[in-house]
Image (tube, rainbow, N blue to C red):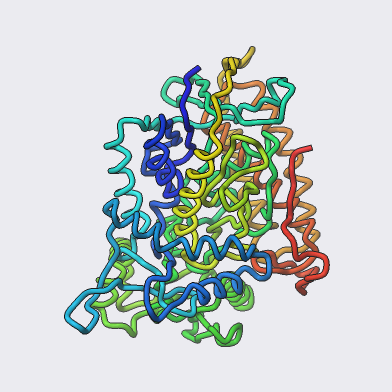
Amino acid sequence: MREFDFIVLGSGIAGLSFALKAAKVGSVALITKRGRADSNTAWAQGGVACVMSDEDSFELHIRDTLDAGAGLCHEDVVRAVVTEGPARIDELMHLGVHFDHRENGNGGNELDLGREGGHSKRRVLHFQDATGREIEHRLLEQVAAHSRIEVMENHMAVDLITTGKLGYAMENSCVGVYVLDESTGVVETLRSDVTVAATGGCGKVYLYTTNPDVATGDGVAMAWRAGAAIANMEFIQFHPTCLYHPDIKSFLISEVVRGEGGILINERGQRFMEHHNPQKELAPRDIVARAIDAEMKRSGAKCVYLDITHKPADFIISRFPTIYETCLRYGLDITKKPIPVVPAAHYQCGGVKVDINGETSLRGLFAIGEVACNGLHGANRLASNSLLEGVVTAHRAFEKSTRQRRERLSFDLPEWRSGEVQDVDELVVISHNWEEIRRLMWDYVGIVRTDKRLQRAATRLRNLHAEVQEFYWNFKVSTDLLELRNLVTVASLVVDCALSRKESRGLHYTLDHLERDDVRFSHDTITRRN
């Protein structure tokens, strides 16, 4: 057993920000199941939404967030994240993070603020079209220079260790985590009074996603198994514009392309968003994704197109270098031709139920970033609020976890025991179940839902869950097996939450209950393990 003052699971903006602050007061184990730069943060193109100009205000940002959240945002949380944002952005810049600037017309420079769907003002700080990669790189530089942070790459958390499971007669608390060293196959026991889940989202539960392969819902699944409350998993955001190309997967075409004037057209070159919402291409993501889905189903087309060719080529290349170069590599010059796009699973607005400080219902366990549900996003996330949430809640979780630190409790945690297990003899079984879950979720639990589709998904997932549990107990743990176990758990949570919400609100749109019902469903969907 190895002991640390803090255990952090995940190496995105939330996990790295927390680790850097925690290392000032204690030892930190930073666990990441792939390389340290493999995170959703590194894939974030658009930027960080924050009030940074005199033309904007906190009240406008709060209103835009509440409007996007369709009545389920917690206004106190929204207000806290928005108003504390500028201080956290200043910290990022102090750590070396660069954001684009432009001439202000008075001989000086100012932040070049972008605009995305649902925002009434330009407030999105960015570094070209690779903001997340810039933030990830700079934070990792700081982590590498810190002697009190031990980064454990290629280590995957298996399960949280709780006093309830150990049989202690006390309030159920998280006291550590079992972690698989993927290079050796050995499961290590890590002990701490403060464990922080910053594991990101669950996009890989769907067949088509903008997320990297690491986004398998690990934190939500582990927290649920440990007995923590989970909330609002029915609200999965589908990004309207993922590149449609047979030779590349998961490449996002940033919402900023629409913010800078890109228009959506069908295969006949006709603009269609004006028939769905007065804000047209700048409507919130749930509206744009449903509009594209409806247009594709109406015409039978495999995609629609995002056209920004009316803008000067120099502007397109300088503003969107990553998108331009990637598309060009696959034979598409976006300065001359529209970009083929389709919606894809992008962001979970639900997650482990927490307060504004990231505290879960399980003592000793915090959750921050996309894995957490604190009420900021409600039923639909406002574009670019996620990176802001990550850095603000990391700061709050650090302050709360250090304020309430007590004398370390003494626990002798048992070593991991595998029992009489064997190596997985047929990996094809795991890959087959993985693909079945993802296609099932795409076909039955996608942008538009029905009770019948959800019931079918629930029935099949119950059977798959039993199969996966059998694998888990009979074979040696591996990353593939653990991810499959987490995927089927999270998929079931999404379906169960969706079945319980008999209305259409935000990202949850069902043909059987088309209207929003503020009398019965203006509250979070909360579930926990029986």
Residue 346 seen in the figure: yes
Q: Position of residue 473 (x, y in %)?
A: 67, 23
The residue closer to the viewer here, 163 or 504, is 163
Whether residue 203 sits left or right of residue 85 in the image: it is right
Q: Position of residue 109 (x, y in %)?
A: 22, 74
Q: Is residue 332 above or below residue 474?
A: below
The residue at the far right in this view is 520
Q: Is residue 292 above or below residue 105?
A: above
The residue closer to the viewer here, 123 or 307, is 123
The residue closer to the viewer here, 425 or 207, is 207
Q: Position of residue 271 (x, y in %)?
A: 50, 85
Q: Is residue 93 above or below residue 17?
A: below
Image quarter (top left, top right, bottom left or bottom right) of the C terminus: top right
Please tell me in which quadrant of the rendered image residue 327 appears: bottom left
Please tell me in which quadrant of the rendered image residue 15 appears: top left
- The residue positioned 66% from the left and 57% from the top of the image is 443
Q: Position of residue 33 (x, y in %)?
A: 45, 35
Please tell me in which quadrant of the rendered image residue 75 appears: bottom right
The residue closer to the viewer here, 435 or 314, is 314
Whether residue 74 sits left or right of residue 248 in the image: it is right
